[in-house]
Image (tube, rainbow, N blue to C red):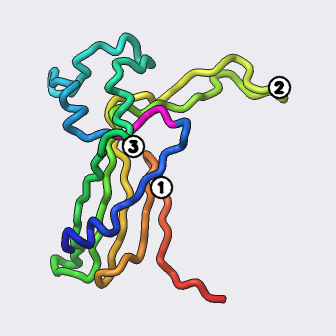
Amino acid sequence: MDAQTVAAFAPRVWLHPDEAWFPSSTQFHLANVHEENGHLVTSQALGCDSCTDPQFLDGQRPNQTPVPVYAQVIPRTQGGLPTNVTDVLYWNFYPYNNGKRVCIGWYSPWGCVGGYSTFGNHVGDWEHLTVRFIDGRPALVYLSQHADGQGATNRPVTA
């Protein structure tokens, strides 16, 4: 798979107008973290598990700073022999993943009783989509979503 084909099928990502957490380059992120006991930690203290400072966690606004999409080309084999299938994984890096708001009580007809909390906040998050090429043509797209995702095939539409 040549670089021109990989670039031609790279995703165009549109973020919701209210999005507050933007992707960044890994260099931008690595400039704001350091290694401690085999783990990367923020150079500036977060303050608490659900705190969202320092500001570098916001990422880089793609309309103000070019943000890379990283590509990983995986030629597929079968029994150790090459096939006509190549997967290209397109990766976006996010300095911060804001968790989901969850009802920690129970739901009544009037809404959540017991209050809400946020779970799943974490520093550093990779998201990806995969384009599968068969005989050099895109045949399948898979969009990841944390522990899940969904695929779509390139099937001709018939009337």
How far apart, in angstroms, are the residues tagged by discs 3 and 2? Answer: 41 Å
Q: Residue at the spot x=19%, y=73% of the render?
A: 2
- Three-letter amino acid code at the position of disc 3: Asn
Q: Which residue is mark 1?
A: 149
Q: Is residue 89 above or below residue 37?
A: below
The residue labelled by disc 3 is 63
Q: Judge whether residue 126 is colored magenta.
A: no
Q: Quadrant of the N terminus?
A: bottom left
Cβ atoms under marks 3 and 2 closer than 8 Å: no
Give the answer, above or below, for where 11 lies relative to 19.
below
Q: Which of the two residues, 12 or 143, is positioned nearer the viewer here?
A: 12
| Quarter of the rendering containing residue 22 | top left
Give the residue drawn at x 41%, y 57%. Answer: 12
Q: Principal SS element in the magenta part?
A: loop
Q: What residue occupies the far top of the structure in this picture?
A: 47
Q: Which mark's residue is nearer the viewer, 1 or 3? A: 3
Q: Which quadrant is home to the C terminus?
A: bottom right
In the foreground, 39 or 133: 133
Going by the numbered disc 1, the residue's amino acid type is Gly
Local secondary structure at mark 1: strand
Where is residue 144 shown, x and y percent of the image? 43, 54
**x 43%, y 28%: residue:** 121
**Front tag of 3 and 2:** 3
Q: Nearer the viewer, residue 115 or 5?
A: 5
**Magenta stretch, residue numbers:** 19-23
Q: As shown in the figure, which amino acid type bears the numbered disc 2?
A: Trp
Label 2: how many Cα within 10 Å (few below 14, some 14–19, many 20+): few
Q: Secondary structure at mark 2?
A: loop
